[in-house]
Image (spheres, rainbow, N blue to C red):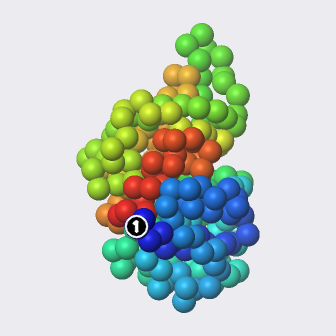
Amino acid sequence: MSAPARRVVVVDYGLGNLFSVCRALETAGGAPEVSADPKTILAADRVLLPGVGAFGDGMSGLRERGLVEPLREFAKTGRPLLGVCLGMQLLLSVGTEFGEHEGLGLVHGRVTKLAPGAADGRRLKLPHIGWNTLRPEGAGWAGTPLEGMAPGSPVYFVHSYAPRPEDPEHELASCEYGTTRFCAAVRRDNLSGCQFHPEKSGPVGLAILARFLEL
C-alpha cells in the first residue's frame, strides 16, 4: 500500500508558474493545494512560495492579497517553507530590482543584480539561463531539501538577480557563472529557498521537492 501524498500549500500571489510547480510536486509525491487564502496558508503542513518576475511586483502581489503577515507568522511555526526563484528572493530583507523594495525579511540580506564576467574580461549575458552545478556552503545540506544531493548536482536557472545573505550560515549552496560566484540557495531554521527551478531540473529537482515534502 503506497504512502499517502504529503499536503503542501502553493501560494498564489499572481506571479507564480503554478501549473508546472504543482505537476512537479505531484510527481514527487505531494498533494498541492493552490491558495491565496491567509487562513489556509497558516494552517498548512508546509508551504511553497513560487514566483517568476520582478521583486517589487512580487511584494505588491503579496500585499494586495494580505499575505505578508501570514507568511511571516507561518515562518514562526517551525513548519517547512520553501521559496523558489522569485519566491526565494522575497524571503530576504531587500530587493534591488527597479529600485529598493522591502521583502519578507525572513532571511537577512539583499537581492542584487549579477555582474558576471568571463576569464577574458568579457561581460556575460543576463539573464543567466540554463544548467549549472551546486556546491555546498554554510553548515551543509543535512536537514534541508538538498539533503542527499551530491555536490555538483545540475539544476536549471533563469535569473538576473541573486540573494546575498548577511550571515554566511544562511547560504546553503552556491554556483559560478563565468568568474562570478553567486548564492544559489538559502536556509534559516525551517526556511529554505532556491534560486533555481526544481520543477525544471529533472530528476535532481524532483528529488529536492521530495525531500522538502518529507521535512
Quadrant location of residue 214?
bottom left
Q: Is residue 76 above or below residue 213?
A: below
Q: Residues within 10 Å of mark 1 (few under 14, many from 20)?
A: few
Horizontal side, residue 29 vs residue 114: left or right:
left
Describe the element under mark 1 as helix, strand or loop.
Answer: loop
Horizontal side, residue 157 vs residue 134: left or right:
right
Q: Residue at x 52, y 22 (%)?
A: 179
Residue 22: percent from left, percent from top? 62, 62
Residue 83: percent from left, percent from top? 52, 60
Q: Label 1: which residue?
A: 1
Horizontal side, residue 211 vs residue 142: left or right:
right
Q: Which of these two is toward me, 7 or 168?
A: 7
Q: Which of these two is toward me, 97 or 106?
A: 106
Give the residue furthest to the front: 1
Q: How many marks?
A: 1
Residue 144: in sight, yes or no?
Answer: yes
| Placement of the C terminus among the 4 image quadrants | bottom left
Give the residue furthest to the top: 120
Q: Which of these two is toward me, 15 or 17?
A: 17
Q: Amino acid at mark 1?
A: Met
Residue 85: percent from left, percent from top? 59, 52
Q: Is residue 160 above or below residue 165?
A: above
Q: Residue at x 37, y 78 (%)?
A: 76
Q: Which of these two is toward me, 5 or 153?
A: 5
Q: Residue at x 40, y 67 (%)?
A: 1
Residue 204: percent from left, percent from top? 48, 41
Q: Is residue 114 above or below residue 189?
A: above
Residue 46: in sight, yes or no?
Answer: no
